[in-house]
Image (tube, rainbow, N blue to C red):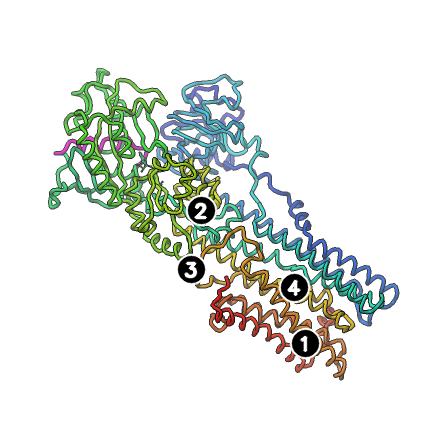
Amino acid sequence: MSANSLPENITSWHSLEVDKALGLLSSNADSGLSVEAIEQRLQKYGPNELEEQGGRSAWEILLDQFKNIMLLMLIAVAFISGFLDFMAWQANTLKPGEVPFKDTVAILAIVILNGVLGYVQESRAEQALAALKKMSSPLVRVLRNGKLVDVAAKEIVPGDVMLLEAGVQIAADGRLIEQANLQVRESALTGEAEAVSKQANITLPEETSLGDRINSVFQGTEVVQGRGKVLVTNTGMRTELGKIAELLQSVETEPTPLQQRMTQLGNVLVTGSLVLVAIVVIGGIIQARGFSNLQELLEVSLSMAVAVVPEGLPAVITVTLALGTQRMVRRQALIRKLPAVETLGSVTTICSDKTGTLTQNKMVVQSVYTNQQNFKVTGEGYAPVGEFYLDSDADYPIVPEEYPEIASLSVACAVCNDSVLQKENGEWAILGDPTEGALVTLAGKVGIEKDQWLSKLSRVGEFPFSSERKRMSVISQVEKVSTGEASVTDVDPKIAGLLNNEPYIMFTKGSPELILARCSGIYLGTNAAPLSEEQRSQVLAQNDKMASNGLRVLGFAYKPLWEVPPEGADETTEENLVWLGLVGMLDAPRPEVRAAVQECREAGIRPVMITGDHQLTARAIATDLGIAQAGDRVITGQELQKMSDEELQEQVDLVSVYARVAPEHKLRIVQALQNRGRFVAMTGDGVNDAPALKQADIGIAMGITGTDVSKEASDMVLLDDNFATIVAATKEGRVVYTNIRRFIKYILGSNIGEVLTIAAAPLLGLGGVPLTPLQILWMNLVTDGLPALALAVEPPEPDVMKRPPFSPRESIFARGLGSYMVRIGVIFAIITIILMEWAYTHSQTFTGEGLNPERWKTMVFTSLCIAQMGHAIAIRSNNQLTIEINPFSNMFVLGAVVVTTILQLMLIYVPPLRAFFGTHWLPPTELAICCGFSALMFVWIEMEKLFFRFMGKKTV
Ligand code: ATP
């Protein structure tokens, strides 16, 4: 059947036999589809993607922008100002040259601009997050052209043969071809929380409901346990999930803690300004003993209301967070939830897995212990070439064939294994778990080829690996002779000694202590014998020796069987095993991790290792990396199990290594740490790590080895699985938060200065408002906004990772930010008010050609703007003097200061701009005086830094 005549309208694949379904889709269970068929089907059915649904509509996003108390106040100001202009226009009391409604139009324009900017930023943030989500979208393992390949989920087509394993999020709907212990959580589709056990070899009535179709799997559901092979029947919007696409999770757009704080800040500012307006109006009325100056007081009130709103702030914050996310992606940390950008900086404890995150996850077997002899194994990477040396004779390699126990152990390594060793571009590489890859390589070094042995010992059953079980077993049928009977003489001599007459054999591998505890016999090279206590302790001693050298050790055993055990009978079948031996592999630490651990410690962050591996292996590696230090404790999962939550809480700050833990222990560890007030980042990769990742303050999933389920539960995905990346992301988080605080100080200090200056004018009896709403908007948006944007990209201060983390729950005003704002605002106001007083008298008395007596207002306007330039330069560092900072290390600040100053001068010296903004020409001397006063602001901040340095106080 050609691709074009594929069955379109079959909805009941579950009622078909597997072979029939394969035939209908022209596919093959052993080789999958051909490249041409895939091409054609991709053309015909399109990519396996769901159309994005949910999220806020464009209108909702736009409307949300105006649900902001500060913008609402501005709108009110615009209308009041418009009303006043209208009255003046009617009464013909407009000043000569004055354009009515200018302020109203300007304010409304700013309100609209702010709304549109916010809208653009937010929708871009949503798109960016959606794109990030796509980047972390899963790879799917499929059989194509007879080869196993990993492809992007969207490239799956009907007819593909897809492989499932624990932790996978299923990428398309399909009919099971085969399965082993397969359990799938289908809550995304059926709402049923319990995992469903799947069965391949049955057909179901057509009308079977979705939840009961146990021979099929569905897109979006999760494999909790086991393995499976699936024939893809439907993709994209034709899947069951596609049919109910509204149920899809929308892109998450939670407001960040900072956005919430900004809303609070807005409320405080608006309330504060209204109180101040009341004081000024009442004070003005009392001063004038009547309502004679009501017009002026109203104008003052309007200006103050505009001045208090930091119009540029929301945009600057959004841009900063977006830039932060981008910088993090460049450092291989993919943010899935926006708040993580800023909260990362607050992490106090990083709990990290060992394998793959702290180590390279490139395993090489170095040591084999079998039949009471220890062998060293040489060789590099996954290439199946290397020599065996007896421990007692390190000079000459042995001939493995002379040691039958090595061959038997190697057969176990090759058969009890799900990974594939293959040559890619001339290099040996593995597809699957590196631990298992190393074992196939080891077998190869002995001449045991996995493929060849899989036909001699075909797999008929298995008890899959899980982090809880810490072991796996494979049951194989022993190759039969032509009579159809398995007999000792007909079995390959390499395994002949393992069997009597049994037709099946089970190989088990896993954590050595656990496997050994399940053994009652031991293999001695040619035959099995009862396992003595002495042999048991010898094995354990050898295991400890290997582990304390940092090796990851696996134990192997076997059991001859008369029949295939039923599914789920692992506990009873994996008993009375015969011990085969130990295999120790090296997984070298990642070279960059040592420095990252050091950096963590300096930054007040405690690294903790949580691993399923043996305590001695874990301790050796943790000590090597600097994670475990003198006095630190190592706790095993068993010990943890016995502890109450309170006991764990008491210990949790002293433990730097948790070994042999199961995923559910991770959750308890996070909770105990959190109860001690720690802010925890936790890594995870397995399907059962999801609860701990969700519970952690920052859940971190592994991009390469992580299961889809763990990624879905995480706040951040490590694209390179590397611990050093967590530390780098933490640093970025700190930089982002520091910069945000920096420009909030910068912007709000100036706002307070403006408000106080405006309030002072009528109280000093200057007769007039120094700043019009239009000029204030100009200051808040342009002369404050541009430098603030530049401050957002300020490079990290040298001590950013040398100070303790800050609580994510601290108030925005904490650590001196509030007092800084008020202090600088007041200084700002004092300097400007002195200038204003002088300029007022001066411009009344010193008049000449082209000089307007109202030009004192322009002097106030100019000095406020120029003072902010000095402020921007000085605020680049909290503690370092400006001369101690490289002026070119943030070219944006320099650029913003130059551009803003030029723009400000244009407002005074370019006639059309002068007319529009209502400014007056200033002679050079007066401009110089403004600059002189403005410079005082810079001087003050530098003096403050010197003063705090002298007092030994460091602001952060
Ligand atoms: P980490 O939690 O740091 O990633 P880990 O890889 O050792 O460490 P798990 O994958 O949970 O953690 O493995 C736990 C233990 O199970 C291992 O120490 C090992 O003894 C055993 N084990 C690991 N992989 C396999 C496997 N493929 N087959 C059998 N046993 C395994």
Among numbered discs 4 and 3, the one appearing first in the sequence = 4
Please tell me whether residue 407 belongs to the stretch shown in magenta.
yes
Q: Amino acid at mark 3?
A: Lys
Q: Could you tell me which residue is drawn at 33 percent across and 53 percent down? A: 594
Task: Determine which quarter of the picture holds residue 377.
Answer: top left
Query: Which corner quadrant of the figure contains ligand 1?
Result: top left
Q: Position of residue 414 (x, y in %)?
A: 26, 33
Mark 1, secondary structure of its residue: helix
Q: Main secondary structure of the magenta part?
A: helix
Q: Position of residue 30 (x, y in %)?
A: 36, 28
Q: Is residue 60 above or below residue 861?
A: above
Please tell me whether residue 140 belongs to the stretch shown in magenta.
no
Determine the residue located farthest toward the right in the rendered image.
91
Q: In the image, 398: left or right of 250?
A: left
Among numbered discs 4 and 1, the one appearing first in the sequence = 4
Q: Are marks 4 and 3 in contact (CB under 8 Å)?
A: no
How many other residues sit within 10 Å of disc 4, few (<14), some (14-19) or many (≥20)? many
Task: Tell me the residue that label 4 is attached to.
Answer: 751
Mark 3, secondary structure of its residue: loop
Among numbered discs 1 and 3, the one appearing first in the sequence = 3
C-alpha span from label 2 to label 1: 52 Å
C-alpha span from label 1 to label 3: 42 Å
Mark 2, secondary structure of its residue: strand
Picture disc at residue 835: 1
Q: Which residues are magenta?
A: 402-421
Q: Amino acid at mark 2?
A: Ala
Task: Tell me the residue that label 3 is attached to.
Answer: 802
Picture disc at residue 681: 2
C-alpha span from label 2 to label 3: 19 Å
